[in-house]
Amino acid sequence: MPNTSMNIDLIAPCGMNCAVCIAFLREKKKCSGCNFECVNKAKSCQTCIIKNCALLAEIPSGFCYDCSKFPCRRLSQLDKRYRTKYNMSMIANLKFIKTEGANKFLSAQESKYTCKKCGEMLSTHRNECLNCGEIAHYL
């Protein structure tokens, strides 16, 4: 049965879709996502500068794209790392969400990150499906 966990609550303030994060998809010590408290959340996630940003706390949307400093230095650094290592841009995700809406974003993400072989969610952090081993075709 396919993983149908994509929803707006899993979009982190930085534009990361937690539904395609390895920490969310793994079986052991599963994280519930950036927007939720979780005992299995990595310390780096718990102390995330972006998630804990004082400016972000003042933004009704809860997304960095509505911040006057968007994209800030920290988000730009994170985005560069993810573009380089994982072929994914958090800044592009945020711009897409702002212009097209979260529902279109989630639909595009589901299409991009669904394994063509078994229908499970692929992780942006891995080159193959965690369920069946199929090589990810979104790279």
Image: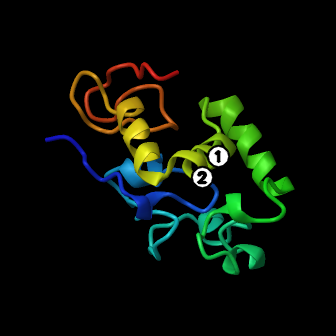
Residue 95 shows which numbered tag? 1
At 67% from the left and 71% from the top, the residue drawn is 47
Return the residue nearer the eye: 56 or 119: 56
- In this image, 108 relative to 2: left or right? right
Q: Is residue 20 visible?
A: no
Q: Quadrant of residue 89?
A: top right
At 26% from the left and 37% from the top, the residue drawn is 120
Q: Amino acid at mark 1?
A: Lys
SS of the residue under disc 1:
helix
Q: Quadrant of residue 69?
A: bottom right
Q: Is residue 132 above or below residue 57?
A: above
Residue 97, position in %: x, y? 55, 50
Q: CA distance from mark 1 to mark 2?
A: 5 Å
Residue 98 shows which numbered tag? 2
At 40% from the left and 26% from the top, the residue drawn is 128
Residue 21 shows which numbered tag? none
Give the quarter of the figure containing the N terminus: top left
Q: Is residue 72 visible?
A: yes
Labels 1 & 2 near each other (Cβ < 8 A): yes
Q: Is residue 3 above or below residue 72?
A: above
Residue 56, position in %: x, y? 70, 73
Residue 133, position in %: x, y? 32, 25
